[in-house]
Image (cartoon, rainbow, N blue to C red):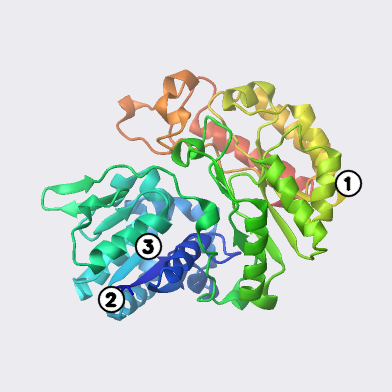
Amino acid sequence: MPQIKSTLVYPPPKVVQQPPLGIATVAGHLRAKGFEVSQLDLNLDLWLLKKYNLLFDESQRKNWEFQGLYLFTVRPKLHRWIQRWSESLAKDDSTVIGFSAFHHNVPLILDMASRIKKINPSKIIVVGGPQTTYDPQSLYADQIDFLVIGDGEVIFEELLNTLDQGLHPNQVEGIAYKSTEGWKKTSERKNTLDLNKIAPPDFNDFKLAEYPELFIPLETSRGCVYRCTFCSETIMFSPFRFKKAEFTYNEIKTLQKQVGKNSNFFYFTDSLINGHIKELDRLCDIILENEDYFHWGGKAVIREKMTREFLQKLYNAGCRLLDFGIESAAPNVLKDMKKSFTREIAERVIKDCHEIGIKVHLMWIVGFPTETEEDHQLSMSFVKNNHQYIHAVSPGYGCTVHDPRADLMRNPDKYGIYWKFGGLIKTPHNWYSKVTTPSIRKRRVREFHKMCHDLKMNVW
């Protein structure tokens, strides 16, 4: 039985709707292997304080994301709470503190890690999450000991086992570690984890009754079957892996017992729940065969195979919400994004969903590098013409260029992307292209939002 104990921490800011699946999945896996683990959702704790809710607004994201802005905007407001959280973690009985990192909470994690180390230098600080895969160097800091890069369940388990045995973890694949010669990476871990062989997530540590709109998150696949030029999930999580329908159904039943009456809505957090149509179809068959009752939804891609008949089957099996990353309704932009659907297919799927009873949420990218003014108007007209079928829309806050593994960043010249002043200062927002500028994108975002509000649409 492993003796080492860890505490997994989910820092703000994220939309507060559901408990954090990432650390819950790692905790469930570790507990099944005999490890002692505790979990903290500091994101919810901060939200429950109410007076800081404005800090969760999308408009505040830059203040969290950039170190300089964080130091002068977020930290002064939250100093007391950051210190309180840090002191509590420094004094608990865990050997390892694990943080879940996204690009917008890196400054907060570094701040907390520094405070923890100052109080208790023996604490081992480990960081995982999307940021360690996107940009591990952003976390190469003296106050961090290890980074987990890849499938966190098995890598973190191996790291803990190695530390528990008093060995140096330089043979653990998929980590970065601090050495006397600077930061070093071990060999890359291949994404070979079989999702059908990991334990269900464990949400028992969370205040489930306190989440304002509680959805129970569930993962049925990792990766994506498409290669959108603004995204890198296919590259990062290749190969695309999925859970068998029978495994997913059994996991749902396990979680229903775990969360009790806290929620009857499951949200599939996959990049797309319809990446494997046959397995989704089989899941619907199992639900219908068991005459089970629960509702569910998730992110999906517009596909021609999403026929009216298939959408009806989804509804009958409990599907009530589909979040479509449509991104644009301009043919030229869809082509440049490497989208696999047409404007006409999108209109048909959206209308069918609405008429069947599945709520549709559309996510857009405003200001793609090749988006002309005419393209922008085509996307606006699509929403105007179909707004009666759309439950909610997310018009974005201007296309960002920040994912180093996405084609936009790997091949900026192909999309006409450039930075002024020789690129001395590159941010996700200050880039230019042949047809767009930062000010043009801001204006288009305002227009998109105004149109949606004028149409009395739900804007998320």
Front-lying residue, 346 or 50: 346
Residue 208 is situated, as x and y percent measured from the top left of the image, at: 59, 75
What kind of residue is marked 3? Phe
Check disc 1: other Cα within 10 Å, few if <14, some if 14-19, many if 20+.
few
Report which residue position mark 2 lands on: 90
Asked whether the beta carbons under mark 3 and mark 2 sit within 8 Å of each other, the answer is no
Check disc 2: other Cα within 10 Å, few if <14, some if 14-19, many if 20+.
many
Residue 231 is situated, as x and y percent measured from the top left of the image, at: 51, 36
Residue 308 is situated, as x and y percent measured from the top left of the image, at: 85, 40
Write the residue at 54% across / 67% down: 53
Of labels 3 and 2, earlier in sequence is: 2
Write the residue at 30% across / 48% down: 173
Residue 132 visible, this orientation: yes
Looking at the image, is 22 positioned above or below residue 203? above
Report which residue position mark 1 lands on: 355
From the viewer's perspective, tell me whether residue 433 is left or right of residue 97: right
Front-lying residue, 101 or 283: 283
From the viewer's perspective, tell me whether residue 86 is left or right of residue 17: left
Report which residue position mark 3 lands on: 99
Front-lying residue, 412 or 227: 227
The quadrant in which residue 366 appears is top right
Of labels 3 and 1, earlier in sequence is: 3
Looking at the image, is 89 positioned above or below residue 429? below
What kind of residue is marked 1? Glu
Looking at the image, is 252 positioned above or below residue 281? below
From the viewer's perspective, tell me whether residue 416 is left or right of residue 338: left
Element assignment for label 2: helix
Measure the C-alpha gap from mark 3 to mark 2. Answer: 13 Å
What kind of residue is marked 2? Ala
Residue 50 visible, this orientation: no
Check disc 3: other Cα within 10 Å, few if <14, some if 14-19, many if 20+.
many
Measure the C-alpha gap from mark 3 to mark 1. Answer: 43 Å
